[in-house]
């Protein structure tokens, strides 16, 4: 197994650790960071999430630069990203931090694009490459989630809701990039409609 694939597997392994940290009651206490109270387990979960996001950046960069792109990587890398983001959002919704409709929009889009990718591969063997709107969506989702888990520190001290702003940006680009992918690849539906 090459290094990018090992990083992807490591990211997948981090997901249950992330889940475990968020299911632990607040018995670990809280920290006050720039005047904001953050549960210790949320802070550790945010670090785990950040490490997982970093592996996402690294595995793709290494795979492309060293020509180590594999079928496993094409399958597992986007799957790991979706599992990580959806898990984080579901927990934020259960904690009443993110509205359920936002989480639903993001999850529906991710599942729809996964289905579209499958159709494209079946039709012509091509893998649907990420476009700039999709990259902005991923960037804003990951940073929104990170800031929401650390309760907008260090921006909370000045009352700037960076996590909420990034989440709105993520939802906008989630919808836009999803529509863009479907519009640009509408040919896959032309045979039966």
Image (cartoon, helix red, strand yellow):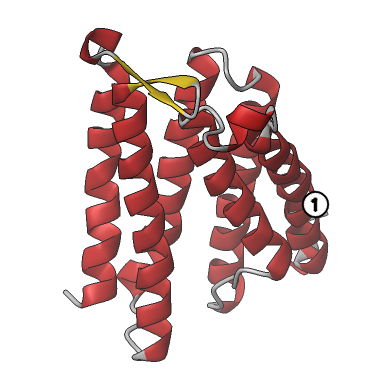
Q: Residues within 10 Å of mark 1 (few under 14, many from 20)?
A: some
Placement of 115 over or under 94, stated as above or below: below
Q: Is residue 81 left or right of residue 122?
A: left
Visible residue check, residue 191: no
Horizontal and vertical percent for residue 27? 22, 8
Quadrant in the rendering for residue 87:
top left
Q: Quadrant of the C terminus?
A: bottom right
Horizontal and vertical percent for residue 66? 34, 91
Mark 1 — residue? 176
Q: Nearer the viewer, residue 127 or 101?
A: 101
Q: Is residue 79 left or right of residue 111?
A: left
Residue at 31% across, 68% down? 72
Q: Is residue 25 left or right of residue 103?
A: left
Quadrant in the rendering for residue 30:
top left
Horizontal and vertical percent for residue 59? 35, 71
Quadrant in the rendering for residue 17:
top left
Residue at 54% across, 19% down? 93
Q: Nearer the viewer, residue 16 or 50?
A: 50
């Amino acid at each position: 197994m090459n290094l990018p694939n090992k990083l992807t597997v490591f990211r997948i392994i981090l997901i249950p650790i992330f889940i475990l940290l968020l299911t632990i009651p607040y018995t670990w206490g809280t920290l006050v960071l720039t005047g904001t109270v953050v549960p210790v387990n949320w802070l550790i979960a945010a670090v785990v999430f950040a490490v997982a996001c970093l592996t996402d950046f690294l595995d793709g960069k290494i795979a492309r630069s060293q020509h180590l792109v594999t079928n496993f990587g094409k399958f597992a890398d986007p799957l790991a990203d979706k599992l990580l983001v959806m898990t984080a959002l579901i927990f934020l919704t259960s904690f009443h931090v993110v509205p359920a409709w936002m989480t639903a929009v993001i999850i529906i889009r991710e599942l729809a694009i996964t289905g579209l990718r499958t159709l494209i591969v079946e039709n012509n063997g091509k893998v649907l490459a990420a476009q700039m709107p999709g990259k902005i969506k991923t960037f804003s989702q990951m940073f929104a989630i990170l800031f929401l888990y650390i309760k907008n520190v260090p921006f909370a001290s000045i009352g700037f809701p960076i996590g909420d702003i990034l989440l709105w940006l993520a939802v906008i680009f989630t919808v836009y990039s999803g529509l863009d992918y479907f519009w640009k690849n509408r040919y896959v539906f032309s045979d039966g409609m």
